Amino acid sequence: MANMLGAGPFITISTLMSALGGPQSMLGWLIALAIALPDGMVWAELGAAMPGSGGTFRYLLEGFGARTWGRLMAFLFLAQLLVSGPLEIASGYIGFLRYLGYLWPGVMANDLPTWKGGAVLVVLGLAMIVLLYRRIESIARLTVALWIGVVITVAGVLATGLWHFDARLALDVPPDAWRFNWGFAMGLGAAARTGIYDFLGYYGICYLGDEVKNPGRNIPRSVLLSLVVVAVIYVGVNLSIIGSVPWRTFVPESEHPEALHVVSAFMERLHGRGVAAAFTLMVLWTCVGSCFALLLGYSRIPYAAAKEGVFFRVFARLHPTRHFPHVALLLLGGLAIAASFVKFSVVLDTLVALRIVVQFLGQVVAVVLLRRRRPEMPRPYRMWLYPLPLVLSAAGWLFVFGTLDPAVLKFVGAAVAAGVGSFLAWSRWNRVWPFEPSGK
């Protein structure tokens, strides 16, 4: 939840409302929820059945065959993670810089960092690496401290919005809002992508399965309860803002500079500059908490995969004295700093597209294959109404993917092709499937 709430509702409200030009954009956010809930059941079943660290790479490996196609699917997931993981972390850094612009104007121009903003991004990214360069026990305490800051910030928005809520503002829909055409469908897809980005992280516990007590119970509870609770909070935060500040003051996003820190503008309108400045500091805190949780989880995945021989061996190295996967931490942390110099819209679309192709759709297929090939596998949690959740999530992912910009689709295609080529080269070098010697 620290991951899901950290930056999402504060940096995407203007992006969401700009997708369809008004409060009707919330429909796309609800579609995102309708996709995430059945997909959460996919994660819950797989996570409870295979609670080892690594999450998706383990599910794809076992689902598609640990000695054959599962190796390719797991490798492709890990390869895209080296791109999508830093992109997701970078989105939090970008959100941090957007809100810092309220206190320190000049750190961004045209939604890109200036030289001052670039220096901030580098310092912030390095600080995240330093904070995580330690054993998991001290990290747990720091995570709780960051989470407390997130809760206080969200509660402040909800309380303020509830007190000043005006239904006429919140439901001020343009006259042609429900004109269904191709443009509406594309806008709906854009709104759904924004909503999906907001929800990313409900499966974070699956990446740390080895460190979870009673995983058969706690993993499904974490996945599904975090989705439900965060969905309620998101609805409250979004309505609090558009019910207190006219959405036309920050839509479209590209024409209103205040859209980059809309919650700060929201607080200033209601309570003045001083309160808004103090609240902006809390938003910055939540962005840090989100990035911290993301880098912690993602740094464990390449390590777990390399340890089992399905990814580059260099990632299996542990720090000699503190015993944590420092190679993955340093690489992902460095790539996240570089990715934070890209526009937020590009980061969001590319991130979501990469996740859909291999990870989300791949896991839908993995559930079906595992149920057919390994019916005896212990499943502490079995998804309700199987296979309906699989159909709903797959249909939703395909809709969102189909509304992406062609340039993003080409990049994703090139990334997948590069991943396949890397897998073949790596497999040939290590003489494993499909190049293993005959008789093995």
Image (cartoon, rainbow, N blue to C red):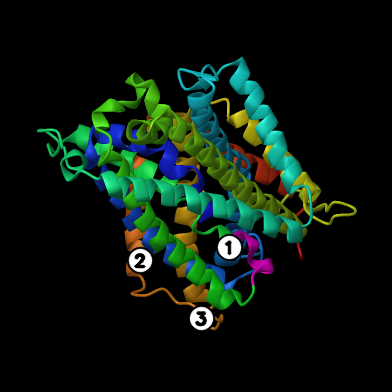
Residue position marked by numbered label 3 in the rendering: 375
| Mark 2 or 3: the one toward you | 2
- Observer-nearest residue: 311 or 167? 167
Residue extending farthest to the left is 175
- Image vertical order of residue 335 relative to residue 68, above or below: above
Identity of the amino acid at label 2?
Pro
Please give the residue where the numbered disc 1 appears in the rendered image. Answer: 206
Is disc 3 placed on a helix, strand or loop?
loop
Residue 19 is one of the magenta-drawn residues: no
Distance Cα–Cα, label 2 vs label 3: 19 Å
- Between discs 3 and 1, the one toward the N terminus: 1
Quadrant of residue 392 within the rendered picture:
bottom left
Q: Amino acid at mark 1?
A: Cys
Q: Is residue 194 left or right of residue 243?
A: right
Q: Position of residue 19 (x, y in %)?
A: 29, 34
Mark 2 or mark 3: name the one nearer the start of the chain: 3
**Can residue 3 be seen here?**
no
Whether residue 123 is visible here, answered yes or no, is yes
Q: Nearer the viewer, residue 103 or 218?
A: 103
Residue 210 in the magenta stretch? The answer is yes
Residue 400 screen position, x and y as percent: 35, 44
Query: Which residue type carries mark 3?
Result: Pro
Label 1 environment density (alpha carbons within 10 Å; few <14, some 14–19, many ≥20)? many
Report x, y in % for residue 302.
69, 51
Q: Secondary structure at mark 1?
A: helix
Q: Is residue 74 left or right of residue 42?
A: right
Q: Earlier in the sequence, mark 2 or mark 1?
A: 1
